[in-house]
Image: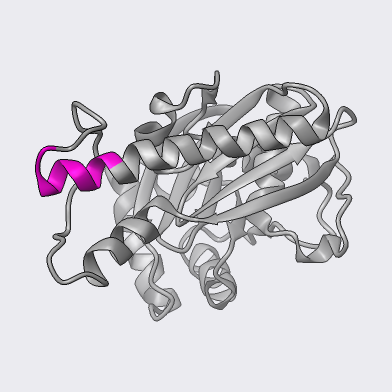
Amino acid sequence: MVLAIDIGNTNIVLGGFVDDELTFVARIATNANKTEDEYATKIRSVLTLHDVHESTVKGAIISSVVPPLNSVMKRAIKFVYGVDPVMVGPGIKTGIKIHCDNPASVGADLITACVAAHHLYGSPCLIVDMGTATKIMVLDETGAFIGVSIIPGVGMGLKALASDTAQLPQIGLEAPKSVIGKNTVDCMKSGVVFGNACLIDGMLDRFNEEMGAELPVFATGGLSSTIIPHCKHKITLDDTLLLKGLNILYKKNN
Protein backbone atom coordinates (compact mmCIF):
# COMPACT_ATOMS: atom_id res chain seq x y z
CA MET A 1 0.00 0.00 0.00
CA VAL A 2 1.05 3.56 -0.77
CA LEU A 3 -0.06 6.04 1.89
CA ALA A 4 -1.05 9.44 0.45
CA ILE A 5 -1.19 12.35 2.92
CA ASP A 6 -2.60 15.77 2.09
CA ILE A 7 -1.87 18.28 4.88
CA GLY A 8 -4.27 21.23 4.65
CA ASN A 9 -4.79 24.18 6.93
CA THR A 10 -7.93 22.66 8.46
CA ASN A 11 -7.68 18.90 7.91
CA ILE A 12 -5.12 16.23 7.10
CA VAL A 13 -6.57 13.77 4.59
CA LEU A 14 -5.08 10.30 4.36
CA GLY A 15 -5.70 7.71 1.68
CA GLY A 16 -4.32 4.27 0.87
CA PHE A 17 -3.68 3.02 -2.66
CA VAL A 18 -3.30 -0.63 -3.61
CA ASP A 19 -2.63 -1.11 -7.34
CA ASP A 20 -4.06 2.38 -8.02
CA GLU A 21 -7.27 1.58 -6.15
CA LEU A 22 -8.11 3.97 -3.34
CA THR A 23 -9.03 1.62 -0.50
CA PHE A 24 -9.85 4.13 2.25
CA VAL A 25 -10.02 7.85 3.07
CA ALA A 26 -9.56 9.24 6.60
CA ARG A 27 -9.42 12.76 8.02
CA ILE A 28 -7.82 14.19 11.14
CA ALA A 29 -7.70 17.80 12.32
CA THR A 30 -4.61 19.84 11.49
CA ASN A 31 -2.74 21.07 14.54
CA ALA A 32 0.69 22.61 13.95
CA ASN A 33 1.49 22.34 17.66
CA LYS A 34 1.31 18.54 17.86
CA THR A 35 4.55 16.56 18.05
CA GLU A 36 5.67 13.71 15.82
CA ASP A 37 4.83 11.23 18.59
CA GLU A 38 1.28 12.61 18.85
CA TYR A 39 0.78 12.41 15.09
CA ALA A 40 2.30 8.93 14.96
CA THR A 41 -0.14 7.74 17.61
CA LYS A 42 -3.12 9.42 15.94
CA ILE A 43 -2.35 8.18 12.44
CA ARG A 44 -1.72 4.62 13.56
CA SER A 45 -4.96 4.64 15.55
CA VAL A 46 -7.05 6.05 12.67
CA LEU A 47 -5.54 3.72 10.07
CA THR A 48 -6.06 0.70 12.29
CA LEU A 49 -9.79 1.47 12.11
CA HIS A 50 -9.42 0.93 8.35
CA ASP A 51 -7.52 -2.35 8.84
CA VAL A 52 -4.21 -0.78 7.83
CA HIS A 53 -1.32 -2.15 9.88
CA GLU A 54 2.38 -1.38 9.99
CA SER A 55 3.47 -4.11 7.57
CA THR A 56 0.88 -3.03 4.98
CA VAL A 57 2.44 0.34 4.09
CA LYS A 58 5.31 0.09 1.59
CA GLY A 59 5.60 3.77 0.67
CA ALA A 60 4.21 7.22 1.41
CA ILE A 61 3.92 10.66 -0.14
CA ILE A 62 3.02 13.98 1.48
CA SER A 63 1.58 17.21 0.10
CA SER A 64 1.56 20.05 2.62
CA VAL A 65 0.57 23.72 2.86
CA VAL A 66 1.57 23.84 6.55
CA PRO A 67 5.41 24.01 6.53
CA PRO A 68 5.85 23.51 10.32
CA LEU A 69 4.28 20.06 9.96
CA ASN A 70 6.45 18.85 7.07
CA SER A 71 9.31 17.39 9.08
CA VAL A 72 6.96 16.39 11.93
CA MET A 73 4.81 14.30 9.59
CA LYS A 74 7.77 12.77 7.80
CA ARG A 75 9.26 11.60 11.11
CA ALA A 76 5.87 10.33 12.33
CA ILE A 77 5.37 8.20 9.21
CA LYS A 78 8.96 6.92 9.37
CA PHE A 79 8.49 6.02 13.03
CA VAL A 80 5.24 4.07 12.53
CA TYR A 81 5.69 2.51 9.08
CA GLY A 82 9.46 2.54 8.53
CA VAL A 83 9.29 4.33 5.16
CA ASP A 84 10.70 7.69 4.07
CA PRO A 85 7.84 9.71 2.56
CA VAL A 86 8.25 11.61 -0.69
CA MET A 87 7.52 15.34 -0.22
CA VAL A 88 5.77 17.23 -3.00
CA GLY A 89 7.86 20.33 -3.70
CA PRO A 90 10.64 21.80 -5.83
CA GLY A 91 12.63 19.13 -7.64
CA ILE A 92 9.90 16.49 -7.70
CA LYS A 93 8.98 15.00 -11.08
CA THR A 94 5.44 16.09 -11.98
CA GLY A 95 5.07 15.58 -15.72
CA ILE A 96 3.59 19.08 -16.11
CA LYS A 97 5.22 22.45 -16.69
CA ILE A 98 4.63 25.44 -14.43
CA HIS A 99 4.36 28.77 -16.25
CA CYS A 100 4.40 31.25 -13.37
CA ASP A 101 6.62 34.10 -12.22
CA ASN A 102 8.14 31.90 -9.52
CA PRO A 103 7.43 28.19 -10.11
CA ALA A 104 9.02 27.23 -6.77
CA SER A 105 6.36 29.24 -4.93
CA VAL A 106 3.42 27.25 -6.33
CA GLY A 107 1.76 25.33 -3.48
CA ALA A 108 2.06 21.55 -3.25
CA ASP A 109 -1.73 21.23 -3.20
CA LEU A 110 -2.05 23.14 -6.47
CA ILE A 111 0.59 21.03 -8.18
CA THR A 112 -1.00 17.80 -6.94
CA ALA A 113 -4.50 18.77 -8.10
CA CYS A 114 -3.21 19.80 -11.52
CA VAL A 115 -1.22 16.59 -12.00
CA ALA A 116 -4.33 14.55 -11.18
CA ALA A 117 -6.63 16.54 -13.47
CA HIS A 118 -4.18 16.43 -16.38
CA HIS A 119 -3.50 12.68 -16.16
CA LEU A 120 -7.03 11.56 -15.30
CA TYR A 121 -9.19 13.96 -17.32
CA GLY A 122 -6.94 15.74 -19.81
CA SER A 123 -6.12 19.35 -20.63
CA PRO A 124 -6.99 22.17 -21.02
CA CYS A 125 -9.22 22.46 -17.97
CA LEU A 126 -10.12 24.45 -14.88
CA ILE A 127 -9.84 22.98 -11.37
CA VAL A 128 -11.79 24.32 -8.40
CA ASP A 129 -10.41 23.30 -5.00
CA MET A 130 -12.68 24.32 -2.12
CA GLY A 131 -10.88 23.93 1.17
CA THR A 132 -9.83 26.50 3.76
CA ALA A 133 -9.33 28.78 0.76
CA THR A 134 -11.04 28.39 -2.62
CA LYS A 135 -8.58 28.02 -5.49
CA ILE A 136 -9.36 28.05 -9.21
CA MET A 137 -6.50 26.73 -11.35
CA VAL A 138 -5.92 26.71 -15.10
CA LEU A 139 -4.15 24.12 -17.25
CA ASP A 140 -3.52 25.01 -20.90
CA GLU A 141 -3.80 22.64 -23.85
CA THR A 142 -0.29 21.24 -23.18
CA GLY A 143 -1.13 20.46 -19.55
CA ALA A 144 0.97 23.33 -18.22
CA PHE A 145 -0.14 25.12 -15.06
CA ILE A 146 -0.51 28.76 -16.07
CA GLY A 147 -2.05 30.38 -13.01
CA VAL A 148 -4.55 30.38 -10.17
CA SER A 149 -7.03 32.61 -8.38
CA ILE A 150 -7.12 32.32 -4.57
CA ILE A 151 -10.34 33.32 -2.82
CA PRO A 152 -11.23 33.40 0.90
CA GLY A 153 -12.83 30.05 1.67
CA VAL A 154 -16.47 29.28 2.43
CA GLY A 155 -15.76 28.41 6.06
CA MET A 156 -13.67 31.55 6.46
CA GLY A 157 -16.55 33.74 5.34
CA LEU A 158 -19.06 31.88 7.49
CA LYS A 159 -16.86 32.20 10.58
CA ALA A 160 -16.30 35.92 9.97
CA LEU A 161 -20.03 36.47 9.48
CA ALA A 162 -20.81 35.04 12.90
CA SER A 163 -17.81 36.27 14.89
CA ASP A 164 -17.68 39.83 13.52
CA THR A 165 -21.36 40.63 14.03
CA ALA A 166 -23.31 41.04 17.26
CA GLN A 167 -26.48 39.13 16.40
CA LEU A 168 -25.65 36.51 13.76
CA PRO A 169 -25.15 32.95 15.11
CA GLN A 170 -22.84 30.10 14.16
CA ILE A 171 -24.76 27.88 11.72
CA GLY A 172 -24.44 24.62 9.84
CA LEU A 173 -23.51 24.66 6.18
CA GLU A 174 -26.32 23.39 3.98
CA ALA A 175 -28.51 25.01 1.36
CA PRO A 176 -31.87 26.49 2.43
CA LYS A 177 -35.05 25.77 0.46
CA SER A 178 -35.11 29.26 -1.05
CA VAL A 179 -32.60 31.95 -1.93
CA ILE A 180 -34.97 34.39 -0.21
CA GLY A 181 -34.43 33.72 3.47
CA LYS A 182 -37.34 34.14 5.90
CA ASN A 183 -35.35 33.79 9.12
CA THR A 184 -31.83 34.59 10.29
CA VAL A 185 -30.39 31.11 9.80
CA ASP A 186 -31.85 30.64 6.30
CA CYS A 187 -30.78 34.16 5.33
CA MET A 188 -27.19 33.31 6.28
CA LYS A 189 -27.30 29.91 4.57
CA SER A 190 -28.60 31.52 1.41
CA GLY A 191 -25.80 34.04 1.33
CA VAL A 192 -23.06 31.56 2.09
CA VAL A 193 -24.16 28.64 -0.11
CA PHE A 194 -25.80 30.39 -3.07
CA GLY A 195 -23.46 33.36 -2.82
CA ASN A 196 -20.38 31.14 -3.13
CA ALA A 197 -21.99 29.19 -5.98
CA CYS A 198 -22.53 32.47 -7.84
CA LEU A 199 -18.94 33.46 -7.08
CA ILE A 200 -17.68 30.24 -8.67
CA ASP A 201 -19.95 30.69 -11.71
CA GLY A 202 -18.80 34.28 -12.18
CA MET A 203 -15.12 33.42 -11.86
CA LEU A 204 -15.46 30.54 -14.33
CA ASP A 205 -17.03 32.95 -16.84
CA ARG A 206 -14.06 35.27 -16.48
CA PHE A 207 -11.53 32.43 -16.80
CA ASN A 208 -13.25 31.13 -19.94
CA GLU A 209 -13.40 34.63 -21.42
CA GLU A 210 -9.69 35.13 -20.85
CA MET A 211 -8.82 31.68 -22.21
CA GLY A 212 -11.03 32.20 -25.26
CA ALA A 213 -12.88 28.91 -24.80
CA GLU A 214 -15.25 27.17 -22.41
CA LEU A 215 -13.02 24.72 -20.60
CA PRO A 216 -14.04 21.54 -18.74
CA VAL A 217 -14.23 22.14 -14.98
CA PHE A 218 -13.36 19.72 -12.18
CA ALA A 219 -13.96 20.37 -8.50
CA THR A 220 -12.52 18.91 -5.32
CA GLY A 221 -12.01 19.85 -1.68
CA GLY A 222 -13.98 19.31 1.50
CA LEU A 223 -16.60 21.98 0.77
CA SER A 224 -17.09 21.35 -2.94
CA SER A 225 -19.93 18.85 -2.50
CA THR A 226 -21.89 21.51 -0.57
CA ILE A 227 -21.43 24.39 -3.03
CA ILE A 228 -20.81 22.97 -6.50
CA PRO A 229 -24.26 21.34 -6.99
CA HIS A 230 -25.75 24.85 -6.83
CA CYS A 231 -23.53 26.24 -9.60
CA LYS A 232 -24.98 26.78 -13.09
CA HIS A 233 -21.84 25.61 -14.91
CA LYS A 234 -21.31 21.93 -15.66
CA ILE A 235 -18.71 20.88 -13.08
CA THR A 236 -17.44 17.36 -12.43
CA LEU A 237 -16.98 16.60 -8.73
CA ASP A 238 -14.02 14.45 -7.65
CA ASP A 239 -13.64 14.51 -3.87
CA THR A 240 -10.42 12.49 -3.94
CA LEU A 241 -8.63 14.33 -6.75
CA LEU A 242 -5.65 15.37 -4.58
CA LEU A 243 -5.15 11.87 -3.19
CA LYS A 244 -5.18 10.48 -6.74
CA GLY A 245 -2.64 13.12 -7.72
CA LEU A 246 -0.39 12.08 -4.86
CA ASN A 247 -0.53 8.47 -6.02
CA ILE A 248 0.43 9.54 -9.54
CA LEU A 249 3.34 11.62 -8.20
CA TYR A 250 4.54 8.77 -6.03
CA LYS A 251 4.75 6.45 -9.05
CA LYS A 252 6.58 9.11 -11.08
CA ASN A 253 9.20 9.53 -8.37
CA ASN A 254 9.78 5.87 -7.48
Which of the two residues, 114 or 68, is positioned nearer the viewer here?
A: 114
Split into 4 quadrants, where in the image is the N terminus? top right
Spot occupied by residue 83 in the image (x, y as percentages of width and height): 60, 58
| Residue at the (86%, 39%) spot, across then down | 144
- 113 with respect to 191 (left or right): right
Q: Report if residue 220 is visible in the image.
A: no
Which of the two residues, 81 or 211, is positioned nearer the viewer here?
A: 211
Location of residue 129 with respect to 226 vertically, above or below:
below
Spot occupied by residue 133 in the image (x, y as percentages of width and height): 50, 56
Spot occupied by residue 85 in the image (x, y as percentages of width and height): 63, 59
Location of residue 244 with respect to 99 vertically, above or below:
above
- 86 with respect to 100 (left or right): left
* Residue 177 occupies quadrant: top left
Which of the two residues, 118 or 186, is positioned nearer the viewer here?
A: 186
| Residue at the (74%, 39%) spot, across then down | 138
**Residue ranking furthest to the top:** 234
Q: Which residues are magenta?
A: 182-190
Location of residue 167 with respect to 144 vertically, above or below:
below
| Residue at the (20%, 32%) spot, across then down | 176
Location of residue 53 with respect to 31 vertically, above or below:
above
* Residue 217 occupies quadrant: top right
**Residue ranking furthest to the left:** 183
Spot occupied by residue 159 in the image (x, y as percentages of width and height): 29, 62
Colouring of the image: one colour
Q: Main secondary structure of the magenta part?
A: helix
Split into 4 quadrants, where in the image is the C terminus? top right
Number of labels in the image equals 0
